[in-house]
Image (spheres, helix red, strand yellow):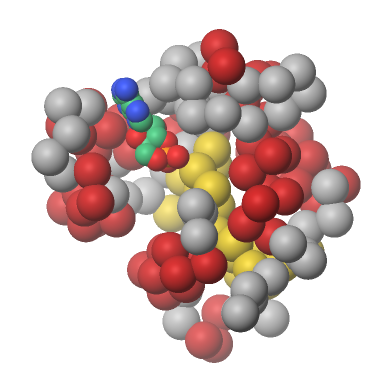
Amino acid sequence: MATNRTFTMIKPDAVEANNIGSILGMMTEAGFRVVALKYTKLSEEQAGKFYDIHRARPFFGELVEFMSRGPIVAAILEKENAIEDFRKLIGATNPEQAEAGTIRKLYATSIGENAVHGSDSDENAKIEGDFFFSELERF
Ligand code: CMP
């Protein structure tokens, strides 16, 4: 059963570009309710653990270095059909292929530095949310 929740991160490139407010605004404007929210920074080890599924990919080292180079905003968001609607809102992984008006089209600069993360399934949304948040931090 769909949980109606997804997990997102505003990545270091978007934080560095001072786009936290604009990006969170697009998420809430699109009807997502904030369940949990955290401004934090990943160590290389934590970034590697979060993206463990990509460990064998050629871009893994670059991804870990990027995701640990500065603070990020982590959030659990809630809305009906959350996973699919959120992926539509953020657009394709590669901003060159992202549709006009999507968060990545507006704020991402490359396939690696793509401004935001969005969970690809209910199962991963739960795993990723649990990575950052205790039950006491969800409202
Ligand atoms: P995300 O949706 O967070 O999931 C995996 C991340 O790996 C992805 O966004 C990008 O930041 C990164 N990534 C995916 N493909 C590539 C690639 N070809 N080169 C560099 N980074 C990539």
For the residue pair 58 and 36, the one nearer the viewer reads as 58
Ligand 1 visible in quadrant: top left
Q: Quadrant of the N terminus?
A: bottom right
Picture quarter containing residue 101? top right
For the residue pair 122 and 76, the one nearer the viewer reads as 122
Residue pictured at 69% horizontal, 60% vertical: 82
In the image, residue 66 lies at what x, y percent? 31, 31
Q: Is residue 73 above or below residue 96?
A: below
Single out the residue that lies furthest toward the left.
56
Residue pictured at 61% horizontal, 26% vertical: 104
Q: Is residue 30 left or right of residue 42?
A: right
Q: Is residue 83 above or below residue 130?
A: above
Q: Is residue 120 left or right of residue 131?
A: right
Is residue 16 visible from the viewing direction of this image?
A: no
Q: Is residue 96 above or below residue 22?
A: above
In the image, residue 46 lies at what x, y percent? 24, 55
In the image, residue 90 lies at what x, y percent? 64, 36
Residue pictured at 49% horizontal, 29% vertical: 93
Q: Is residue 66 above or below residue 86?
A: above
Picture quarter containing residue 50? bottom left
Picture quarter containing residue 63? top left
Q: Quadrant of the C terminus?
A: bottom right
Is residue 10 visible from the viewing direction of this image?
A: yes
